């Protein structure tokens, strides 16, 4: 496995600015190389900051957002208009503003009867419209070390024959979710962890220290070509 790269930034705002610039640069490079990049977004506070920065920097970047395919690593299985949905936040913060048209949100309760049904539908959509790999998968990490909606000790950690899984009884509300599996998340040229806050510091240290993925799921994902941990000083404080 390629050794992860760790970047430590002064605070969450500087981190978000750096990641936004890096993402836009990667997308331009991929398009110049003839690829139509596919990316997987994450949710959370740091993602909101990142998305606003992408919208701010995008006009001068040269990215053709009509040639970028957008997916999600996980989603809360709630109504389509719920503020809990990662897709709604991303659309409001940057996707609509930059003119992204090839956007694939995960199913809501209006689209599927159960999280499992929604996961199966999303897997079918990825098979139909996805490429062999993501250009970039972006992931947050929880204080317990979870990524996407793959939580410590859950049976979903051992699913290796599916693209997406339904999650019930999530230890973090809301209880029902849909998540890509490790098998899907690992199909990425680059995996980026975006982490802010001292409450994440122990999990970051354990993940980078080689913890078992059943204890710290973040330890179970790496990119095919690179893995980058974008941290602020607080989240890096135990390294």
Image (cartoon, rainbow, N blue to C red):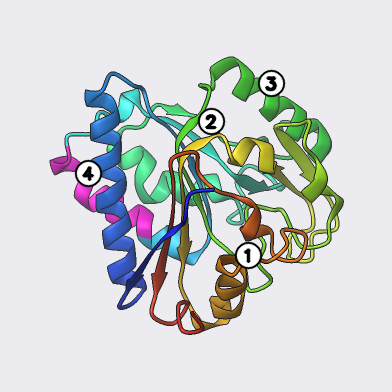
| Residue that appears at 61% across and 56% down | 84
Circle 1 is placed at which residue position? 210
State which tag comes first along the sequence, 1 or 4: 4
Question: Comparing marks 3 and 2, which lies closer to the viewer?
Answer: 3
Q: Which residue does the image show at 60% across and 41% down from the upper left? A: 185
Closest to the camera, between mark 1 and mark 4, is 1
What residue would you read off at disc 4?
A: 58
**Structural distance between the alpha carbons of marks 3 and 2:** 12 Å
**Residue 215 on image: x %, y %:** 75, 66
The stretch of residues the image draws in magenta is 50-61
Under circle 1, the secondary element is loop
* Total residue callouts: 4
User: What is the chief secondary structure element of the magenta stretch?
Assistant: helix
Residue 198 as seen in the image, left or right of residue 7 = right
- Judged left or right of residue 121, residue 10 is left
Q: Which residue is mark 2?
A: 104
Compared with 142, 160 (above or below) is above
Identify whether 46 is placed above or below 197.
above
Task: Name the disc covering residue 70, or none.
Answer: none
- Mark 1 Cα-neighbour bin, 10 Å: few <14, some 14–19, many ≥20: few
Residue at 82% across, 36% down: 116
Q: Residue 103's spot in the image, x, y percent?
A: 47, 30
């Amino acid at each position: 496995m390629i050794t992860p790269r760790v970047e430590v930034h002064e605070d969450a705002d500087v981190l978000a600015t750096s990641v936004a610039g890096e993402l836009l640069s990667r997308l331009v490079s991929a398009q110049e190389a003839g690829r139509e990049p596919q990316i997987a977004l994450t949710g959370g506070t740091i993602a909101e900051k990142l998305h606003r920065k992408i919208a701010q920097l995008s006009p001068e970047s040269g990215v053709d957002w009509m040639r970028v395919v957008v997916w999600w690593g996980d989603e809360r299985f709630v109504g389509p208009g719920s503020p809990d949905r990662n897709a709604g936040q991303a659309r409001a913060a940057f996707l609509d503003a930059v003119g992204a048209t090839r956007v694939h949100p995960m199913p809501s309760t209006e689209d599927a009867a159960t999280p499992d049904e929604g996961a199966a539908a999303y897997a079918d959509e990825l098979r139909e419209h996805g490429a062999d790999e993501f250009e970039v998968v972006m992931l947050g990490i929880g204080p317990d070390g979870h990524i996407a909606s793959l939580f410590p000790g859950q049976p979903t950690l051992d699913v290796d024959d599916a693209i997406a899984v339904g999650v019930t009884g999530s230890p973090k509300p809301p209880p029902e979710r849909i998540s890509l599996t490790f098998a899907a998340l690992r199909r990425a040229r680059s995996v980026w962890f975006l982490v802010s806050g001292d409450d994440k510091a122990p999990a970051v240290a354990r993940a980078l220290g080689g913890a078992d993925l059943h204890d710290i799921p973040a330890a179970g994902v790496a990119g095919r070509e690179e893995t980058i941990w974008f941290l602020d000083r607080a989240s890096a404080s135990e390294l």
